[in-house]
Image (tube, helix red, strand yellow):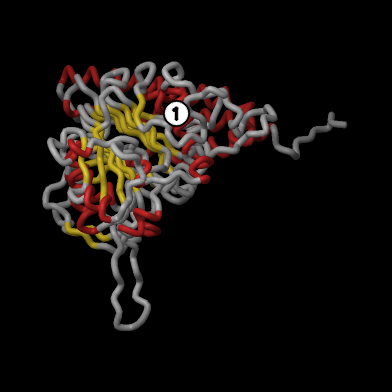
Amino acid sequence: MPCTTILVGKLASNDSSTMIARTDDGHFDVKKLTVLEPDSRKRTYTGVISHLTVPLPEKALRCTICPNADPKKEGVWAATGINAANVGMTATETITSNPRVLSADPLVVYKKARKRGEKDVPGGIGEEDILLLVLPYIRTAREGVLRLAALLEEYGTYESNGIAFNDENEVWWMETIGGHHWMAKRVPDDRCVIAPNQFGMDSFDLEDAFGKKEAHLCSADLKTFMADNRLSCCLEGCFNPRDVFGSHTDMDHIYNTPRAWFMGRYLCPFSHSWEGPQAEFGPESDNIPWALAPDRLVSVEDVKYLLSSHFQGTDFDPYTSRDTGKRGMYRSIGINRTGVAAVCQIRSNVPDEIKGLEWICFGSTTFDALLPVYPNVPKMPGYLADVSETVSTDTFYWASRLIGALADPHFAQSAQLIERYQNAVITRGRQLIREYDRRMAETGDGSLCAEANEKLARMAKEESDAALGRILLLASERMKNGYNRADN
């Protein structure tokens, strides 16, 4: 699924938290935020797409998920969440590969029986399944990598994916290689990672992966897999995983690398050159770094800005009024068909019950607001959780979709209204989080998380209803059939 991911190490963030964030860019998927409670009676999981049945461990942790409103269509697609051990996960970022890799280790695709007497052959695991099979059963980010690695090696996957994990101290990024192979790298604490639907890692310490395993992990046979299949195209003495396992296609230069360029340009405007004839990196550069040391510390607001971006300030902005000749030529990060965007933030220096914050934005991120909630609760407010396929302003998802659809045709006129709406939700959200952080630190009463979430949801509804009313009036005034008796 086409998505955009941003990862932030604890020394790169403004508040010493770790953050993993992703836009889940489906095809207008109807999403909600719910809590998945452990069910000891459920002993297996079966995927809708792959028809694969996987046994589940006995002990599970409660976690949040962002599933599809109707799981009967294509499955749950849990997308993102934080569990009771304060481990975040986002799954998955669809990434690229190449024929050399896919011929050596083919994807494991479901095969339906063609004639009587034959049996269906299950596929591997994929985006539909991965979060549900991993997040409830891990207590650290590293454990997430290791559990998913074991599943990939046993069952394989039917697609190429990148997966992120974070806990209080570490952020890990994992990328699949063909049907069964994988590699994972701990994000350096002072770095941000930018991932736009491409195989991303551009360096990897094989000595560490096959030795101490401090910051690099991979398939046990990765070296022989590369050698036996003559996968490497790197010059002697260097190893760039992106060159070996990824792609550098013309379509990448339209769809993927420009997003990395915009994110890098924002995070490192001074330490790297991004524009002009002497630019170090351009929108179609294949060598934009996977991890960057930002020129200033990164906040949740910075992450939201990037995930909402549409090449503003450049000739490629589809909303610019200037005739640049380049308008809309590259795929934006903020697009119309996003179902949900989430920032999983794990904080330090607060009680365990409130270390996690999940920031949620439904619909097109360019127009919609980011709301923080505490994930360590038995259930989410109805405004976030009670979402169906029926359009209703009683849910954050549908209110957000409506705001975006109405504002988009009137971008210039609605931009200030949208900015005020987004700032109001995140400002009032932060005020409530500050209040309840203090109250829970003083009282030790973790049950206050549920009370805080209800107030946050009511606030989001109040601001969204008001914004929707203002945007609706603006759009109504600009309808093409607007006449009155004073018209000539």
In this rendering, the answer to whether 366 lies above or below 134 is above
Q: Nearer the viewer, residue 113 or 206?
A: 206
- The secondary element bearing badge 1 is classed as helix
| Rendering coords of residue 26 (x, y %) | 45, 47
Relative to 403, is 231 on the left or the right? Answer: left
In the picture of the structure, the residue carrying the numbered disc 1 is 263
Q: Position of residue 285 (x, y in %)?
A: 48, 34
Q: Can residue 189 be seen in this view?
A: yes
Name the foreground residue: 253 vs 16. 253
Residue type at tag 1: Met
Tell me where residue 339 appears, x and y as whole percent.
44, 43
Furthest residue toward right? 488
Q: Is residue 88 above or below residue 157?
A: above
The residue drawn where x is 44% and y is 21% is 272
| 454 sits left or right of 470 in the view | left
Residue at the extreme front: 236
Name the residue located 59 percent from the left edge and 35 percent from the top edge.
Answer: 408
Q: How many marks?
A: 1
330 in relation to 298, above or below: below
Quadrant (top left/top right/bottom left/bottom right) for the C terminus:
top right
Q: Residue at x 64, y 32 (%)?
A: 410
Expressed as whole percent of the image width and height from the top left, the position of residue 178 reads 32, 53
The image quarter in which residue 110 lies? bottom left
